[in-house]
Image: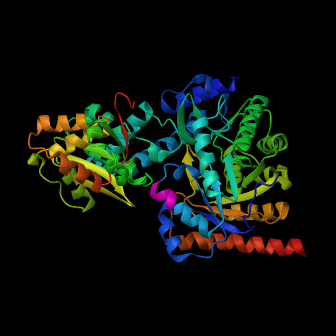
Amino acid sequence: MSGNRGLPSRAGIGLRAQHVGELLATRPAVPWLEVHPENYMSGGAALASLEAVRREYPVSLHGVGLSLGTAGEIDARHLIRVKSLVDHIEPCLVSEHLSWSTAGGVYLNHLLPLPYTEETLAVVAGHIHEVQDALGRRILIENPSSYLRFRHSSMAEPHFLAELARRTGCGLLCDVNNIYVSARNLGLDAASYLDALPAHGIGEIHLAGHAENDADGRVILIDDHGSPVAAPVWRLYERALERFGPVPTLIEWDTDIPELAVLLAEAGIADRMLREDDRACAA
Amino acid sequence: MLALHELQARFADSLLATEDPALLDLVDGDGLDARARLAVYRHHLLTTLTAALEAAYPVVCRLVDRRFFAYAADAFIRRHPPAGPCLGEYGAIFPDFLASFPACEGLPYLPDVARLEWAVHMAAQQSTAAPLDQARLQRVDPSDMAGLSFVPDPSLALLASPWPVDKIWTAHQEGKALPGLDGGGVCLQIHAAGEDVTIRVLEPATYAFRDALARGLTLGEAAGLALESHPSFDLTGAIQQMLEDCVFNDFTLITGEGA
């Protein structure tokens, strides 16, 4: 069961509201686009613009609101809204996160960290099954950027992701910047993390910039998607391509959003690396 | 070790209210205080939700300045966090919160400006509904007309304020100075037409009539209310105008036998 329905192994961009008008007017040759479904669920002009974008480009829906890691029931109303948008837009890919955001009916608007235990594995796997059954398709699960870890975690994150993929048949979205950010914040080795992911399960890669903040005299990296991709993250991306082969790659930029041309140029860098990797694989 | 649901409840409390010692004990600080690690999540939560409120309430934000807005937003978010992940729908009760927020007492018009902004914000997110079938309306037996109930367009909002909130809103769109506040109140209709949201000033009688219909009263009841407060109310003209404005999209007949 492949989750990818027509997304090319090229580099696309995360489409944000301020670029939609320019994109539709100029139709740049970007291979594909990704959006957050939560921004299009009310309908109106936003949904109309997404319909127009979908007519011109392959589109991936990258959810932030299903809170797959919440103990207990998944938000059924939100799942219905996701399904209705998926049925309407017919995206090439659907993805979500290994995280939680909802507790006691409150939505905390952040991809919050999970303890990696057997209990959590059962909870998340159950919810992924439920979502894949509801949507009638495979989804990808993204590794989060982390600022803390729990003492009682009994599994490393890449092993937890691999086990989720094994149990549910889901694919994985490898956010290379998140790996780098988490590794720096939690004292892990980013390359070893990458090497521990199951290569065959990777259906998409994310790249983005991060910020460096001082927290009580120690540097904490913040996954703010507010700058160009950092040099060590590009190097990690190279390693990811060597290991996973050419995989659809996305540039995300969510704060201090630059001109569309800047985003397209950033995607162009990844795209050239992808095509070199493609040739290397073919050779 | 805490069960996952217990950990999540305490994590939520620690972000929005007070830090839970049992949760902090679970965090592997790795050379950094667990509180500092938790603070990264709290900071993101508060700043992104404040940005969502600012996007819905840009005029309120400019009226009180950004620092005060962030202060009010922080109190609001902690007391009324979102119930779901669509942030474009977050903040419906922010106007009521501002009305009861002691620090806003000196700006009595602020809650109504916020109500106008919310109506505009929500109208902009609505899809255009099919217009009312006028041929079908014309086939209704005249003796049944009083029992008709109309379905408002999903984008329609009606707002009556003792303050000139439309002029305040417009002044901010055009970057002009705040108008005088002694200009008196206003009755407004907010409605999406295509991709645009229109704000229209309604005559008090028209407002009373449409407001009654929007609340689900029948045509007869709405006309009665409008006539009671405004004896010169012209019902035929009001119905015609209402149809031209496309603010109601459907109707049903509520009668003794039909219901």
Quarter of the rendering occupied by the N terminus of chain B = top right
Q: What stretch is highlighted in magenta?
A: A44-48
Query: Residue A126, located in which quarter of the rendered image?
Result: top right
Quarter of the rendering occupied by the C terminus of chain B = top left
Give A277 or A167, whichever is nearer the viewer. Answer: A167
Q: Which residue is drawn at 14% across and 54% down?
A: B179
Relative to B7, B210 lies left or right: left
**Residue A37 drawn at (x, y percent):** 58, 51
Relative to B213, A225 lies left or right: right
Query: Residue A279, located in which quarter of the rendered image?
Result: bottom right
Q: Is residue A111 visible?
A: no
Specify whether residue A45 is painted magenta: yes
Q: Which residue is drawn at 49% across and 71% down?
A: A22
Magenta stretch secondary structure, dominant:
helix
Q: Is residue B23 above or below residue A130?
A: above
Relative to B181, B255 lies left or right: right
**Residue B172 drawn at (x, y percent):** 25, 57
Q: Is residue A83 visible?
A: yes
Give B210 or A192, whichever is nearer the viewer. Answer: B210
Relative to B214, A141 lies left or right: right
